[in-house]
Amino acid sequence: PVGRRYYWRVRGCRGEVCGDWSRVMYLNVGRTECDFNGDGYGDLAAGRSGVSASVQLNVGGRIAAAVDADWPYYVYRLACGDADGDGFEDLALLGELGELGAERTRIHRGGTDGVAFTPTHSLPATGSFLGGGLALFDADGDGLDDLFHSDLGLASEAGVTGGVRVYHAPLSSGSRESLLVGEVAGDQLGHDLAGGEDLDGDGVVDLVVGGRGVFVCFWGPLSNDEVRTTRVTDPNPEREADFGAWVSVRRGSIAVGGGSVSSASGARGMAHLYEHLSSGFRRVTSVLGSDTGLAAMVPLGDMGFGVTEARTRAVVGTLELGAIVRARELVLTRAGELSSTIDVDGDGVSELLVGDYSFENADGSEGAVLVVRGTAPWDTLQVVANGTSDRFRFGEYLAR
């Protein structure tokens, strides 16, 4: 695959007397997220709730129209990461296999031909109440991506707090599992999660989990049940609902969503941006959506942000003085997920992917994914269609 991984460790010596070696560190150079076939371009994985999921490969900077695989899952969430350390991104699907009727997370291995149709690993999606979060990233620095899925029913000594189940690589039915739980009953942690970035600069990646009126950062290494946490509550509890319903992390910025209910024009969405300082989390600004609401928000390059409003419009622009200066608006039929994970055109900057799962294609299929350039002028590079007329709701879920 394109790119390399560099490993190192260090220790201090004085003369012939040396201390212990540090833990092994590594750095990926030239590798691209969601690059399933290793050609250096990010590929597209999209799911349809209650239908299936599919992968479309990137051919020289353009997502191919042909569908390479289609799995008969009732898909809830998708995630990509390198679970086996071979340099090819793998695909995780959280969903229900029709004939079995059991919720499971399946890992499909990437390779030179794309994503394997047959899963290499299948893990029970255990938990009393699964949340909306799924991710693959390296929790403990061993070079293999671990699997995270949220569980709103997890409990600690404080009561039912919600949290995250971590399955540590190498992934198999016998993978070691650790639990990341909250400290306050009723937080319902697990509505969404985002991670894979080092927020405090200690060289280890961290995890952000959204809950009911709260988000919690679990500080890495995330390799056992004893993990340091920081809890941040809704800054406007008297005005908002659903703070923590969605979270996104990109380039050190944390976006946390909530819905305002006190506007004279009705329910309006609100997003809050945070950064981490040595003294703790600082709220940089809050962004109030239009009177149609604000459904999701992801940071982009050039200080840009992508936003969906009321599931009928996507907005791309820059953040200035607490407001989105709109550079582009995309009218949608029914917005699915937003993602800023993959670099489609190979310029080193991730694009904004906007799912529109009710989009009507010329061939009669339903659903599309809009690929918007990740930097100004944020023009639309491609509209990726369903590929087959008997499929629908394409773009409801995106790997991220």
Image (cartoon, helix red, strand yellow):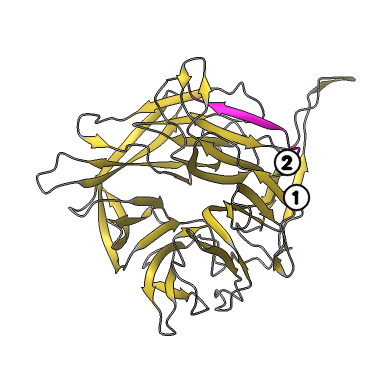
Please give the name of the residue rendered at 42% of the width and 57% of the height, measured from the top-left corner: 338
Q: Circle 2 sits in a helix, a strand or a loop, which is it?
A: loop
Q: CA distance from mark 1 to mark 2?
A: 10 Å
Residue furthest left in the image: 264
State yes or no: residue 176 in magenta.
yes
Whether residue 246 sits left or right of residue 391 in the image: it is left
Amino acid type of disc 2? Ala
Rendering coords of residue 339 (x, y %): 46, 56
Q: Which mark is residue 169?
A: 2
Labels 1, 2: front one? 2
Q: Circle 1 sits in a helix, a strand or a loop, which is it?
A: loop
Rendering coords of residue 372 (x, y %): 42, 67
Amino acid type of disc 1? Gly
Rendering coords of residue 396 (x, y %): 44, 61
Q: Which residues are magenta?
A: 171-182
Q: Is residue 171 above or below residue 97?
A: above
